[in-house]
């Protein structure tokens, strides 16, 4: 088997690193284990290779032993994976992820389908098929086939595949008062009963909403859509009369006090450590166009710094294993930075270029400022250098892991355990209260002010414990425990500036970008100043509450979190309180991608912001007219 694989790769003029999907054809699990073990040496993970770079599949685990037809079934499966640009989930029973055969290889078992991205425009997708035979002139036989497909050209795939993928129904309707909204809901129920949900939803996506109030119904299927409309018909008159808000668990929404189209829109970029395993897994199934390469920049993760690690592993994992995997990811600063920036760029394109949500400005949380500069087009995206992030000792052992920067600054003995060097805690107390209790503590720092009642501190573990006792508040371990946003970082400022020194894009956008450097506008035309400002924010306290307040003072009312998770959304909501605003996130941990996005869009539309739902629900194709007589 290994010999057949090497000959096939040699004949194709390529090597195993180009193969991203391997279809096994062993009839039973024992055969597939032997097959994988034999091929592991060919598909081994070398230095700098993605350790999860080749997904395994096998139709025999689905349909059983089909004899000589197994090779044909495996070939069809590989061709379909290349054609649809999607890795299939590994069938149950394909292999035991904890068993022998995967060690040292690039093989991975996916628990869910994942998009198959290419690194550059015109790049190829390559799959392989392993074929086992049981007869030949010298006994058992083996063959290895390669299947290639070139990525779509500039025209690319369609922008959205919402109704063909795991999308949900989004049905807006408007009127001038509550009773009129109720009548509209009743009319829509009758129309759906007669024409079906799809026709009605598609029509509504292309209908102007001219009423003073807008209700948006979100539902996973037609039966639920009818139930949501029935609830709207029943509840909206009272909600409108009382000046309240109507919402349901599925995301349906109507407010009697919409912000209106005049509020400014800010995109908010979360910190680098917001990424989590499985984040964005539905993005490319819902919006194939987002995976289209642009300007020569890879859409997928670069080799050796794989953001695929955020959703791939040796196989389907249980909750404890997933938590361990996430803890390992958070420790890998280069991977988290790369994945956070990828999410920022892709979701910015989705909201701005596909759905028509045009931002007036933006701001970020901590390293989210770097993501913001790439995503909004200030820094040239083609100049991203994830390899430099992976190579710098700052992110290997100076500011993380053993934290040599701290050890040297404080003269700690080499025998000091890592856990006794540095700790980071989230305190449920205001920053002024925390600072007042820091008297006499010279090795603890306020690193972040998330809200008026949530503060992050970091420093020597014994002093952090003493501070928490002095404040007398609840405290929790922070997800990340790196050395940032404090004066201990000062010796690394030049290195951090160099890592954030990127050429400016040819066409710098005219957006108002705000920064925690001085809680004012970013100078987007000075490359050197930008690099220095980013480095300075990494040694200074991030007062995110102040940043959100500054944005609100400048007229921003819509805050759309662009990136994984919804932490910034919560902090903005808590900070602004009763002040008029709407904060939403297009991704929420634990929620399906389509549901989270649909609920965010529904809230924006209900408050009066223009969103192009026609992209999600294009009009039905018109039947051709009669030919010439």
Image (cartoon, rainbow, N blue to C red):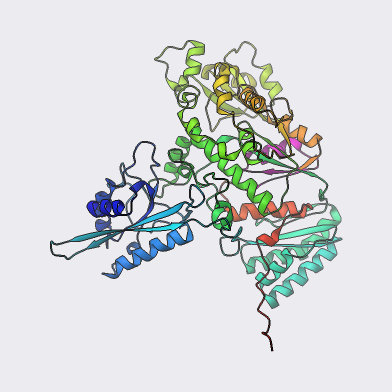
Q: Quadrant of residue 428?
A: top right
- Above or below, 372 against 441 in this view is below
Q: Quadrant of residue 581?
A: top right
* Observer able to see residue 464: no
Residue 43 horizontal side relative to residue 608, left or right: left
Magenta-colored stretch includes residue 4 = no
Residue drawn at x 86%, y 60% as measured from the top left: 177
Horizontal and vertical percent for residue 69? 30, 70
Q: Which quadrant holds the C terminus?
A: bottom right
- Above or below, 331 against 202 in this view is above
Horizontal and vertical percent for residue 4? 24, 55
Q: Residue furthest bottom?
A: 629
- Above or below, 620 against 415 in this view is below
Q: Which quadrant holds the N terminus?
A: bottom left
Residue drawn at x 73%, y 28% as measured from the top left: 519
- The one nearer the camera, 32 or 188, is 32
- The one nearer the camera, 365 or 134, is 134
- Above or below, 85 against 371 in this view is below
Horizontal and vertical percent for residue 591? 58, 51
Q: Residue furthest left?
A: 138
Horizontal and vertical percent for residue 354? 66, 54
* Observer able to see residue 559: yes
Q: Which residues are magenta?
A: 558-585
- The one nearer the camera, 58 or 450, is 58
């Amino acid at each position: 088997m290994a010999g057949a694989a090497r000959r096939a790769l040699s004949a194709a003029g390529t090597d195993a690193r180009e193969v991203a999907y391997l279809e096994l054809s062993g009839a039973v699990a024992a055969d597939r284990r032997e097959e994988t073990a034999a091929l592991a040496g060919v598909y081994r993970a070398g230095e700098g290779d993605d350790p999860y770079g080749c997904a395994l599949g096998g139709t025999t685990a689905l349909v059983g032993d089909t004899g000589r037809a197994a090779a044909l079934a495996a070939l069809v499966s590989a061709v379909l994976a290349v054609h649809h640009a999607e890795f299939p989930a590994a069938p149950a029973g394909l292999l035991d992820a904890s068993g022998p055969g995967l060690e040292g290889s690039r093989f991975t078992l996916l628990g869910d389908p994942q998009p198959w991205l290419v690194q550059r425009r015109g790049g190829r997708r390559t799959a392989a098929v392993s074929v086992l035979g049981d007869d030949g002139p010298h006994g058992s036989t083996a063959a290895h086939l390669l299947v290639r497909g070139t990525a779509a050209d500039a025209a690319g795939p369609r922008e959205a595949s919402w109704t063909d993928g795991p999308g949900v129904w989004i049905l807006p309707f408007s009127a001038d008062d509550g009773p009129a909204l109720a009548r509209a809901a009743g009319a829509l129920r009758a129309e759906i009963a007669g024409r079906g949900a799809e026709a009605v939803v598609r029509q509504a996506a292309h209908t102007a909403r001219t009423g003073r109030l807008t209700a948006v119904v979100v539902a996973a299927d037609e039966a639920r859509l009818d139930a949501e409309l029935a609830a709207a018909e029943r509840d909206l008159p009272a909600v409108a009369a009382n000046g309240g808000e109507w919402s349901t668990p599925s995301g349906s929404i109507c407010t009697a006090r919409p912000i209106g189209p005049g509020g400014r829109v800010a995109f908010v970029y979360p910190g680098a450590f917001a990424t989590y395993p499985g984040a964005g897994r539905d993005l490319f199934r819902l919006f194939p166009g987002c995976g289209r390469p642009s300007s020569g920049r890879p859409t997928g993760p670069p080799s050796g710094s794989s953001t695929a690690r955020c959703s791939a592993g040796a196989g389907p994992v249980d909750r404890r294993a997933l938590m361990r995997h996430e803890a390992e990811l958070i420790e890998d600063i280069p991977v988290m930075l790369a994945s956070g920036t990828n999410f920022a760029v892709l979701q910015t394109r989705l909201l701005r270029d596909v759905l028509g949500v045009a931002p007036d400005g933006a701001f970020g949380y901590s390293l989210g400022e770097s993501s913001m500069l790439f995503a909004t087009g200030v820094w040239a995206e083609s100049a991203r250098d994830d390899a430099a992030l992976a190579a710098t000792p700052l992110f290997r052992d100076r500011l993380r892991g053993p934290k040599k920067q701290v050890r040297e600054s404080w003269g700690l003995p080499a025998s000091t355990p890592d856990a006794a060097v540095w700790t980071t805690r989230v305190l449920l107390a205001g920053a002024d209260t925390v600072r007042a209790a820091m008297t006499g503590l010279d090795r603890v720092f306020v690193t972040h002010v998330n809200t008026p009642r949530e503060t992050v501190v970091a420093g020597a573990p014994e002093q952090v414990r003493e501070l928490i006792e002095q404040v007398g508040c609840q405290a929790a371990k922070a997800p990340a425990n790196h050395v940032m946003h404090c004066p201990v970082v000062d010796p690394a400022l030049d290195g951090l500036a160099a890592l954030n020194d990127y050429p400016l894009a040819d066409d710098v956008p005219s957006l108002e970008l705000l920064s925690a450097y001085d809680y004012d506008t970013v100078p987007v035309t000075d490359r050197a100043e930008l690099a220095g400002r980013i480095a300075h924010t990494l040694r200074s306290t991030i007062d995110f509450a102040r940043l959100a307040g500054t944005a609100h003072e400048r007229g921003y009312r819509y805050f759309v979190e662009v990136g994984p998770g919804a932490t910034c959304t919560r902090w903005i909501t808590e900070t602004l309180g009763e002040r008029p605003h709407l904060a939403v996130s297009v991704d929420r941990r634990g929620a399906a991608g389509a549901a989270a996005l649909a609920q965010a869009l529904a809230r924006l539309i209900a408050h009066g912001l223009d969103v192009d739902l026609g992209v999600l629900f294009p009009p039905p194709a018109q039947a051709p007219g009669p030919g010439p007589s």
